Image (cartoon, rainbow, N blue to C red):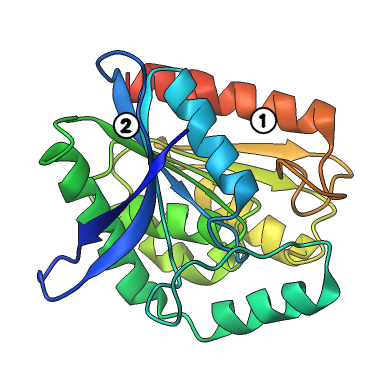
């Protein structure tokens, strides 16, 4: 079981809540878990707990804290799905990346862990890409990130390893967007892309109807090996 902590913003003017899961022994590294649009819900906490069980210090910041704290929504409930969309549409992604920087600083300072990875899902997959391009994170992984094709002009700034999991039947990332991502990133030595044929958005969600067990295990195994190599 983890605990809720507060992480200071970069300017120190405020703080935001985050779920923290500690490993049983000294951390081998740290993993920031970035939520889908549904908040730090039980599925995201489960992912953080899993990383802690693997020996990492794991932290899952509440991305929408400027709008509301304690958001935890269910993707299978239509009303809550729409509420999550509304939160995402109102989110300031540039400020969100600065919050990721604040989490990295907290981990390396207060947490005492020098090497940090980040894994994000859906909206968090986009944030994983932004983090790779805009921060000094040691490694990043994005699952079914939405909107990455519109940020390929930042790819030159990616200096640390980035892995993206791309389901080919993603209803939120059409084939032309996937083609643009491949065209823009296939030649980047820092980037690894994995396609999952015929799978849809959210296939690695911990709970709910979207999960595909075999694909989730494949992608998660790749992520674990990636962090073992680049984070600890």
- Residue 186 appears in the picture as rendered: no
Which residue is painted at 37% across and 79% down in the image? 66
Q: Earlier in the sequence, mark 2 or mark 1?
A: 2
Rendered position, 90 above or below 175: below
The residue indicated by pointer 1 is 219
- Residue 152 appears in the picture as rendered: yes
Question: Viewed as shown, does residue 223 lie left or right of 93?
Answer: right
Q: Identify the secondary structure beneath mark 2.
A: strand
Which residue is painted at 43% across and 62% down in the image? 62
Question: Viewed as shown, does residue 42 lie left or right of 105?
Answer: right
Q: Identify the secondary structure beneath mark 1.
A: helix
Residue 98 picture location, percent across and down: 26, 66
The residue indicated by pointer 2 is 30
Mark number, residue 42: none
Which residue is painted at 34% across and 74% down in the image? 94
Depth order, front residue of 42/102: 42
């Amino acid at each position: 079981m983890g605990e809720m902590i507060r992480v200071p913003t970069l300017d120190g003017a405020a703080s935001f809540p985050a779920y923290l899961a500690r490993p049983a022994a000294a951390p081998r590294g740290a993993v920031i878990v970035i939520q889908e649009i549904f908040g730090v819900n039980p599925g995201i906490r489960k992912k953080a707990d899993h990383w802690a069980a693997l020996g990492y210090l794991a932290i899952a910041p509440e991305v929408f804290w400027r709008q509301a704290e304690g958001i935890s929504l269910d993707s299978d409930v239509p009303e809550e799905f729409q509420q999550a969309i509304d939160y995402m549409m109102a989110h300031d992604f540039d400020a969100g990346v600065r919050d990721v920087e604040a989490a990295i600083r907290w981990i390396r300072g207060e947490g005492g862990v020098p090497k940090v990875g980040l894994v994000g899902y859906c909206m968090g997959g986009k944030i994983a890409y932004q983090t790779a391009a805009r921060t000094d994170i040691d490694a990043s992984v994005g699952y079914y990130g939405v909107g990455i094709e519109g940020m390929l002009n930042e790819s030159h700034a990616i200096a640390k390893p980035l892995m993206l999991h791309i389901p080919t039947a993603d209803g939120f990332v059409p084939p032309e967007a996937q083609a643009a991502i491949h065209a823009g990133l296939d030649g980047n030595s820092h980037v690894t892309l994995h396609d999952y044929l015929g799978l849809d958005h959210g296939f690695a969600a911990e709970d709910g109807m979207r999960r595909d067990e075999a694909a989730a295990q494949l992608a998660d195994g790749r992520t674990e090996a990636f962090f073992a190599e680049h984070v600890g």
